[in-house]
Amino acid sequence: MSMCLKGGRVIDPASNLDKIANVYIDNGSVVAIGRAPRGFKPDEIENVRGLVVCPGLIELSAHLREPGFEHKGSIVSECRAAAAGGFTTVCCTPDTQPVVDNASVVEHIKQRAARTRAARVQCLGALTRGLDGQVLAEMRALKESGCVAVTNADNAIADTSVLRQALAYAASCELTVILRPRDYWLSSEGKMHEGAVSTRLGIPGTPEAEEVIAVTRDLTLVEETGVRAHFSRLSSRRSIALITRARRAGLKVTADVAINNLLYIDRDVGSYDSNYHVYPPLREKRHQSRLRTGVKKREIDAICGNHEPHEADAKSTPFSLSAPGTATFDTFLPALLSLVERGVFSLTTALAAVTQAPSEILDLGCGSLSPGLPGDICVFDPNLEWTPTSENLLSAGKNTPFLGQPMRGKTLMTLVDGRVVYRYNG
């Protein structure tokens, strides 16, 4: 199957490319941009004038819920929602039931994802068995089964000696460790950022120190063990300073931020809307401003959606009793474009943070439109206005603050390995 995407604005941050051009795809790969290869005759020509053509988006932290939590979502529903959002690769977290701490669970997820014929799924293996923070998982076996990294997800490891051993083991396996820096004792009771807003609302708070202390500890262990580490979903301005300093010292560390922390602050919780109950918590404006600057200056490498679908009952409770997280696949792209429209950072910077950077962090071999790489492509209309509703969101989770709110920007077509896996029908 061969295809020509004709006349679109092609943006590929990895190649420093931003121009009106044709994109040619054959046998699942990009073969040329601009001029067609000699003798090339596409089976299909798609007119994409006025649209943006970019590498498929890559999600570093997706909770696909299956196996074990199918009442919240499934691999089928969430991979289809991902494709509708322009994502071609999603990295699924290991906090399923059973946990992704052995090869059989990895194989189950991979088989289910392959049958879905939507977004590609990469598994993140567990750092400790059952994510309990006590006994190390068989990381070498997880790597051999296809896991691209290991993580303890949002489960803090209270015992520093266990974490040290885990990082050393991962380093010996040449596996990247994804760390969500969280001090066990300071974060266990909090439901939002600790500050004036949490005091006024009477909601238990999580102090900024819980992240900063954990980042300091983790960086010390990263330096000692030599492991390649990625810090997931930073929320504190002081964390960025620590990561930047560590990089200058030569540590192999990268970082991302969740889009919710770029969009909202703790004051948005004022109405007790449980859709703003997320982890890490929404912090004060000064933290959000520093996070935005961090993305702009490339001090923060990537932006993730931290997609967490929930059933209605999990969110239709008092704020402190609700489950944390929002479903982001369907609305991620227009939310990202809204930040570009406000001048927070450029479109190229935004796309680099969700294509090139995630691929480089986990060595995925995609995230670019360079000839020879997989034909993973997102085609979107940056000006199309639409309104998310329970009916038009493909994710099983409808837990998003954007529900019923007009948005600008929509994925019109998504290709994985040169095959159309999503097409917007209006």
Image (tube, rainbow, N blue to C red):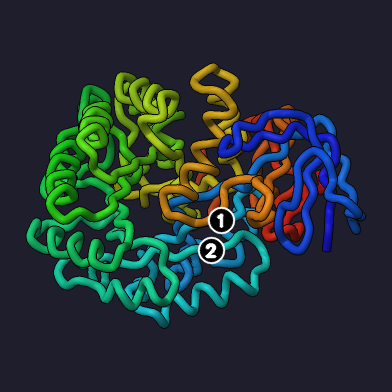
First in sequence: mark 2 or mark 1? Answer: 1
Q: Residue at x 15, y 35 (%)?
A: 209
Q: Which residue is mark 1?
A: 89
User: In the drawing, does residue 33 fall left or right of residue 165?
Assistant: right
- The amino acid type found where label 1 is placed reads Thr
Q: Quadrant of residue 211?
A: top left
**134 vs 352, nearest the viewer:** 352
* Residue 205 in which image quadrant: top left
Q: Position of residue 129 (x, y in %)?
A: 24, 73
Residue 121's label in the rendered image is 2
The answer to whether residue 198 is seen in the rendering is no
- Residue type at mark 2? Val
Labels 2 & 1 near each other (Cβ < 8 A): yes
Judge from the rendering whether residue 75 lies leftward or rightward of residue 382; answer left or right.
left
Determine whether 254 is above or below 184 in the image.
Answer: above
Classify residue 48 as left or right of residue 340.
right
